Image (cartoon, rainbow, N blue to C red):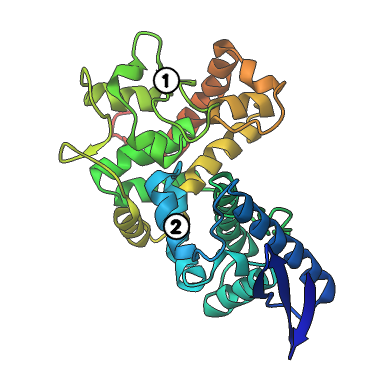
């Protein structure tokens, strides 16, 4: 086993069973080269013993195709691959290093104004797929295992005021209006709303069970209905099927309709997800405890298996929604125009 520096980069030469193997390590750093050389030897020895057939020469594009075919693929994986593949597609897995990650981050930030959080999400998917490659026996170790993400700066999230809410609802198409009200009055995610079934709405109890959620905590959680949410559902009530549809078809995207509604309403630009944040903020302002808000919204508890909110009972949820109900009624009353008072004026003989 030997390291040689050719120009700016180190190269490794290893003898296994009388056969000489060479690999360019793609780094000018001696310490990093030693680590890569050990990984190279591990791969060669694994191949020699027939224990596992590693494929570090596989490109990221080939790995992506295999992952999409047989991995546990989430929607956000496919979304991120659209931006990962143009940069990483032709790169061999053994050439994926932290130095390359820095190049990718710089390229992404230069091409388009992005936040560190956005690029972090890209790299989380890249790292996840490299772990999958290890599990599948394609590579021996994940070079991004301890990759440090850029610390994201907290940004102020927009909160929809009652006045802007009314403008938005007035400007939205009927099917989108129902979705907006559902988001503001339940805190459900867009995907949860568009997958919601009539079978999971209990009108007698005034509650719904979330049909489909991205988190285990969110699955089948119960949310009490506000008065306007219950009235809206009662008008278009069905016995089964999807609640929110467009011309009786499932809704997969609302991006175009949402952008049009924002433009017509004249309000400040915001994301659909900000409606969920608005729901949370309104409950916060009304004094609802964090655990109750989390239970209503189906937040992931992460590693805290003893999280209190997973045991929040329905009465506490109802109290929280009752507070929201009272706030909505108050806003409706305040914003309702007063009827013009007719003045009798002076009358003769009085």
Q: Nearer the viewer, mark 1 or mark 2?
A: 2
The one nearer the camera, 296 or 144, is 144
Q: Residue furthest left?
A: 247
The total number of labels drawn is: 2
Q: Quadrant of residue 320?
A: top right
In the image, residue 124 above or below residue 74: below
Q: Position of residue 85 (x, y in %)?
A: 46, 67
Mark 2 surroundings: few (<14), some (14-19) or many (≥20) residues within 10 A: many
User: Taking the image as drawn, is residue 117 in sight?
Assistant: yes
Q: Quadrant of the N terminus?
A: bottom right
Q: Position of residue 303 (x, y in %)?
A: 70, 31
Q: Which mark is residue 189?
A: none
Q: Secondary structure at mark 1?
A: strand
Determine whether, in the image, residue 34 is placed left or right of residue 269: right
Horizontal arrangement in the rendering, residue 123 relative to residue 63 (left or right):
right
- According to the picture, the residue beneath numbered tag 2 turns out to be 64
Where does label 1 land, which residue?
Answer: 209
**Is 78 rendered above or below residue 169?**
below
Which quadrant does the C terminus fall into?
top left
Residue 49's spot in the image, x, y percent?
63, 50
């Amino acid at each position: 086993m030997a390291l040689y520096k050719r120009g700016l980069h180190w190269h490794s030469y290893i003898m296994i069973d009388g056969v000489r193997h060479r690999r360019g390590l793609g780094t000018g750093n001696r310490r990093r080269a030693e680590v890569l050389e050990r990984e190279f030897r591990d791969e060669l020895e694994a191949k020699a013993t027939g224990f596992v057939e590693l494929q570090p020469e596989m490109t990221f594009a080939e790995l992506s195709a295999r992952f999409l075919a047989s991995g546990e693929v989430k929607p956000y994986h496919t979304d991120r691959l659209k931006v990962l593949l143009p940069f990483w597609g032709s790169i061999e897995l053994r050439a994926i290093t932290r130095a390359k990650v820095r190049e990718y981050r710089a390229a992404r930030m230069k091409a388009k104004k992005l936040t560190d959080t956005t690029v972090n999400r890209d790299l989380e998917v890249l790292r996840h797929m490299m772990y999958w490659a290890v599990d599948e026996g394609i590579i021996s170790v994940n070079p991004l295992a301890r990759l440090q993400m850029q610390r994201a700066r907290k940004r102020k999230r927009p909160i929809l005021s009652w006045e802007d809410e009314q403008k938005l609802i007035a400007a939205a198409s009927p099917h989108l209006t129902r979705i907006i009200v559902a988001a503001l009055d339940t805190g459900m995610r867009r995907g949860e709303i568009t997958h919601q079934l009539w079978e999971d709405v209990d009108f007698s109890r005034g509650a719904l069970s979330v049909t489909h959620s991205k988190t285990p905590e969110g699955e089948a959680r119960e949310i009490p209905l506000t008065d306007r949410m219950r009235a809206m559902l009662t008008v278009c009530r069905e016995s089964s099927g999807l609640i929110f549809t467009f011309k009786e078809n499932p809704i997969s995207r609302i991006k175009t309709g949402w952008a049009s509604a924002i433009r017509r309403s004249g309000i400040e630009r915001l994301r659909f997800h900000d409606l969920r944040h608005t729901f949370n903020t309104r409950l916060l302002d009304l004094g609802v405890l964090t655990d109750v808000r989390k239970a209503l919204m189906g937040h992931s508890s992460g590693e805290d298996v003893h999280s209190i909110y997973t045991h929040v009972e329905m009465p506490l949820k109802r109290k929280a929604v009752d507070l929201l109900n009272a706030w909505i009624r108050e806003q409706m009353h305040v914003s309702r125009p007063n009827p013009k008072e007719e003045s009798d004026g002076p009358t003769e003989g009085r």
